[in-house]
């Protein structure tokens, strides 16, 4: 579990800088996708914050530096069994994937949005990669 936590943490990018994104992609009537971008990044920042915090806490608990709460124990057992923790799914887009598939999918979604930030509005959109597709 400790190795899995370290691997996921290593692959997780930094939080999106929403202030910089809003400066580069301001809310405008002419370009409504800027609003979608900021909303999506806000949701993904919340999700990655939960994931990173629980993984760091698990690492501390494994080392004996932190008491493992019942919620943290559920995350630990889910990772041990290769399942996506319910605590993550409660803050996540809908997914039925096991832990490995979920993690890979999340990283790809984050890369999609980072490419959008870096390269401008994409020509085509990965609709199923959007957190809240109704936006």
Image (spheres, rainbow, N blue to C red):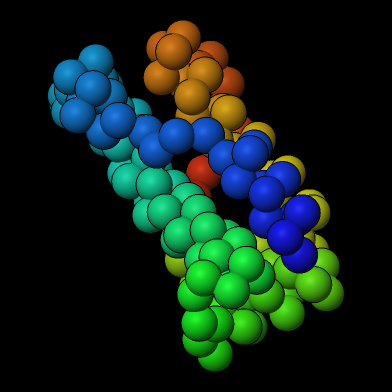
Residue, far front: 64
Residue, far bottom: 70
State whether residue 58 appears in this view.
Answer: no
Residue, far right: 81
* Residue 86 spot, x, y in % from top left: 60, 76
Q: How many marks?
A: 0
Does residue 32 appear to the left or right of 63 in the view shown?
left
Does residue 47 appear to the left or right of 26 in the view shown?
right
Q: Nearer the viewer, residue 6 or 83?
A: 6
Q: Nearer the viewer, residue 68 or 118?
A: 68
**The quarter of the displayed image where residue 15 is located:** top left
Taking 52 as reference, is 22 above or below it? above
Quarter of the picture containing the N terminus is bottom right
**The quarter of the displayed image where residue 12 is located:** top right
State whether residue 53 appears in this view.
Answer: yes
Which residue is painted at 80% across and 72% down in the image?
80
Which residue is painted at 74% across and 69% down in the image?
79
Which residue is painted at 33% across and 46% down in the image?
42
Does residue 94 appear to the left or right of 78 in the view shown?
left
Taking 37 as reference, is 47 above or below it? below
* Residue 57 spot, x, y in % from top left: 51, 66
**The quarter of the displayed image where residue 121 is located:** top left
* Residue 46 spot, x, y in % from top left: 38, 54
* Residue 23 spot, x, y in % from top left: 18, 19
Q: Nearer the viewer, residue 65 or 32?
A: 65
Q: Nearer the viewer, residue 135 or 1?
A: 1
């Amino acid at each position: 579990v400790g190795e899995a936590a370290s691997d996921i943490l290593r692959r997780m990018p930094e939080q999106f800088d929403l202030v910089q994104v809003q400066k580069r992609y301001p809310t405008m009537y002419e370009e409504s996708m800027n609003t979608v971008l900021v909303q999506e990044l806000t949701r993904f920042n919340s999700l990655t914050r939960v994931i990173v915090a629980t993984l760091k806490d698990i690492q501390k608990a494994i080392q004996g530096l932190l008491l493992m709460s019942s919620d943290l124990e559920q995350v630990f057992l889910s990772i041990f069994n290769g399942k996506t923790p319910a605590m993550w799914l409660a803050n996540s887009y809908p997914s039925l994937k096991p832990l490995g598939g979920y993690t890979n999918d999340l990283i790809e979604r984050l890369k999609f949005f980072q490419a959008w930030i870096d390269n401008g509005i994409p020509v085509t959109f990965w609709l199923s990669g959007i957190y809240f597709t109704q936006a």
